[in-house]
């Protein structure tokens, strides 16, 4: 089975079934990606940057290319997680800024040492 790695401070890696999308694989590994449009290639919130193994992903189809173009994501390493299917080992980076709503960084109990 292909090995997928999500590079992120809270990212995960593991083996997943071939032909899953990156979005589905992330979910399987307990690392759900944002996907505001529900995986319909119309929001780009699921985008990732492919670091290694781009050739092990399905080819970009018209809908994915159209969405990437509209968001000016023209570098070839950008893929939509909901469209790219895993055919072999791959390593992708997930930008931390996409995760602002999942981790409410609340600081509490900040003690200061005194005297
Ligand atoms: S989830 Fe919206 S484009 Fe992938």
Image (spheres, rainbow, N blue to C red):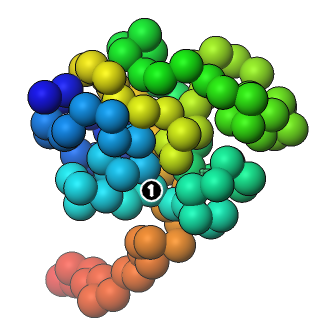
| Residue 111 pos. (x, y %) | 25, 84
Residue 4 vs 33, above or below: the answer is above
Q: Front-most of 102 and 60? A: 60
Secondary structure at badge 1 equals: loop
Q: Front-most of 77 and 100? A: 77
Label 1 residue near ligand 1, CB within 8 Å: yes
Q: Residue at x 62, y 24 (%)?
A: 60
**For residue 79, which quarter of the picture?**
top right
Q: Residue furthest top?
A: 55
Q: Which residue is mark 1?
A: 33
**For residue 92, which quarter of the picture?**
top left
Q: Residue furthest bottom?
A: 109
Q: Residue furthest right?
A: 70
Quadrant (top left, top right, bottom left, bottom right) of the N terminus: top left
- Left or right of 100 in this view: 115: left
Q: Residue at x 42, y 72 (%)?
A: 103
Residue 53 vs 73, above or below: the answer is above
| Residue 21 pos. (x, y %) | 41, 42
Residue 14 vs 91, above or below: the answer is below
Q: Residue at x 57, y 56 (%)?
A: 39
| Residue 65 pos. (x, y %) | 74, 29
Visible residue check, residue 63: yes
Quadrant (top left, top right, bottom left, bottom right) of the C terminus: bottom left
Visible residue check, residue 52: no
Q: Residues within 10 Å of mark 1 (few under 14, many from 20)?
A: many
| Residue 25 pos. (x, y %) | 30, 47
Q: Residue at x 28, y 89 (%)?
A: 109
- Left or right of 45 in this view: 53: left
């Amino acid at each position: 089975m292909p090995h997928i790695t999500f590079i992120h401070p809270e990212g995960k890696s593991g083996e997943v079934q071939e032909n899953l999308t990156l979005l589905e694989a992330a979910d399987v590994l307990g690392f759900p990606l944002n996907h505001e449009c529900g995986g319909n290639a119309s929001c780009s919130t699921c985008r990732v940057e492919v670091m290694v193994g781009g050739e092990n992903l399905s080819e970009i189809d018209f809908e994915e290319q159209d969405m990437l173009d509209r968001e000016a994501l023209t570098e070839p390493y950008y893929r939509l997680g909901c469209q790219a299917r895993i055919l072999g080992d791959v390593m992708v980076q997930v930008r931390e800024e996409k995760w602002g709503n999942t981790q409410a960084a609340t600081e509490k109990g900040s003690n200061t040492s005194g005297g």
